Image (cartoon, rainbow, N blue to C red):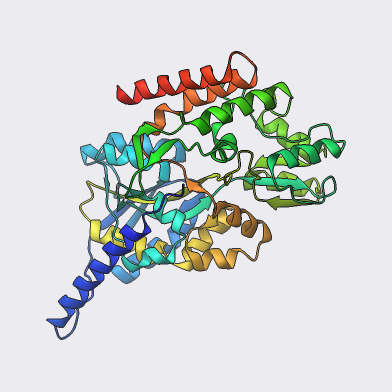
């Protein structure tokens, strides 16, 4: 089931637009917003270069100084949660959408008013930046996995995952299919599209289109059917927990498999190796759409910022422009979230192909409860793939363990 909160966003945008129109009726000349002071932005090194130019422009046009503080991306979330309540944190951070639940839970992030700008972004990106019907972030990129195919080994796109395995075996290659796994944690992120095709998302979806973190969907009949398939694929050698992501990439670029389930981060090595590849949709294993997780990155405003209006202006009308979104895409390789920038980036066939697959995806859950899911989920997949017990019993034990942690 696809999560959508665009209707809620648009309703809010329409209400805001109506208020602006009514306000405009009582004044002869609407006044331009006035800003002052400064903004501090925590950003990683890759994106700092792009923001330097737009920060200078913002200061010249709006009179607000923007100080960029470079930090390791992986440290930003926890440092922000620690420092924001003290008043020593930044006004704005760059981050990933699945941080959002924890940021809201800790009360450190403020809502962002996108207004009618929301319609200018990919819907999945706006949805990912929403939590309990409220938008909190300015998205700038989307990212997902797809099925890469060595066209010289298999010329046709398989209709189903069973067809894919059959074609892989018929090709005579050493591996019918490759996906990177970990001997202790498997890789729920990469295996998720196959699980989703059995109708087993992580959490149930509520009537307002948000995730219900108290209702695990992992334990439904589809989840158990997926567990049975994991055991079958493990026994057949289709899934191998000794094949890491690095090994999977090396074997694919060596021409030892026609199929590789991965993301755009492995394209440079594949291109350098001269592989004649295609980027295809992920075929269904369970009958429903094999929807990958979609990851979105963007910018959030601190709930403790004393300059939220300027911060909102900087994000929506400066970072949310085609020029900046394109510049961020060019330095990071992640597809832009802004539709006009994405359409321009689609002149790159790889971006277009991954984007087409991502359009069928779902945002990775951004609820805090997701933090307790990954460990049990991955270790259980390892046990099932390696034949360490009855797959359904192992899956049910995993669901019980996760649920008990959510319940506290």
Residue displayed at 48% across by 38% down = 201
Residue furthest toward the left? 26
Residue furthest toward the right? 172
Please state the horizontal and vertical placement of residue 42, each as a whole percent of the image. 38, 46
Closer to us: 167 or 143: 167
* Corner quadrant of residue 404: top left
Does residue 283 appear left or right of residue 15 in this picture?
right
Closer to us: 18 or 227: 227
92 vs 175: above or below: below
* Corner quadrant of residue 392: top right
Does residue 33 appear left or right of residue 78 in this picture?
left
Quarter containing the C terminus: top left
* Corner quadrant of residue 84: top left
Residue displayed at 55% across by 44% down = 292
Residue displayed at 40% across by 30% down = 371
104 vs 246: above or below: below
């Amino acid at each position: 089931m696809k999560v959508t909160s665009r209707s809620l966003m648009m309703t809010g945008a329409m209400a805001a637009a109506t208020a602006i129109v009514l306000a405009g009726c009582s004044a002869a000349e609407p006044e331009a917003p006035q800003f002052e002071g400064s903004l501090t932005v925590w950003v990683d090194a890759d994106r700092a270069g792009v923001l330097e130019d737009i920060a200078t422009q913002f200061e010249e046009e709006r009179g607000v100084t923007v100080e960029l503080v470079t930090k390791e991306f992986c440290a930003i979330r926890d440092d922000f949660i620690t420092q924001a309540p003290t008043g020593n944190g930044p006004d704005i951070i760059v981050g990933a959408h699945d941080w959002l639940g924890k940021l809201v839970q800790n009360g450190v992030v403020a809502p962002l008013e996108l207004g009618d700008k929301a319609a200018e972004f990919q819907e999945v990106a706006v949805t990912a930046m929403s939590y309990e019907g409220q938008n909190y972030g300015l998205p700038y990129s989307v990212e997902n996995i797809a099925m890469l195919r060595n066209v010289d080994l298999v010329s046709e796109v398989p209709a189903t995952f069973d067809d894919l395995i059959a074609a892989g075996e018929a090709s005579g290659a050493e591996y019918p299919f490759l996906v990177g796994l970990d001997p202790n944690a498997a890789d729920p992120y990469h295996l998720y599209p196959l699980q989703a095709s059995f109708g087993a998302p992580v959490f149930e979806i509520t009537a307002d289109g948000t995730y219900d973190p108290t209702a695990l969907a992992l334990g439904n009949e589809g989840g158990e059917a997926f567990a049975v398939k994991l055991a079958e694929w493990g026994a057949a050698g289709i899934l191998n927990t000794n094949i890491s992501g690095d090994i999977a990439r090396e074997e694919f670029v060596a021409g030892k498999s026609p199929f590789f389930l991965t993301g755009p981060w492995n394209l440079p090595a594949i291109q350098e190796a001269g592989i004649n590849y295609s980027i295809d949709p992920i075929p269904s294993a369970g009958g429903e759409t094999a929807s990958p997780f979609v990851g979105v990155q963007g910018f959030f405003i601190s709930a403790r910022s004393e300059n939220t209006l300027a911060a909102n202006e900087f994000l929506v009308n400066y970072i949310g422009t085609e020029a900046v979104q394109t510049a961020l895409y060019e330095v990071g390789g992640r597809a832009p979230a802004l539709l006009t920038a994405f359409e321009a980036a689609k002149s790159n066939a790889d971006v277009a192909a991954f984007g087409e697959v991502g359009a069928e995806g779902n945002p990775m859950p951004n609820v805090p409860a997701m933090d307790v899911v990954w460990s049990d989920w991955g270790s259980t997949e390892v046990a099932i793939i390696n034949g360490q017990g009855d797959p359904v019993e192992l899956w049910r034990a995993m669901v019980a363990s996760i649920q008990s942690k959510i319940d506290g």
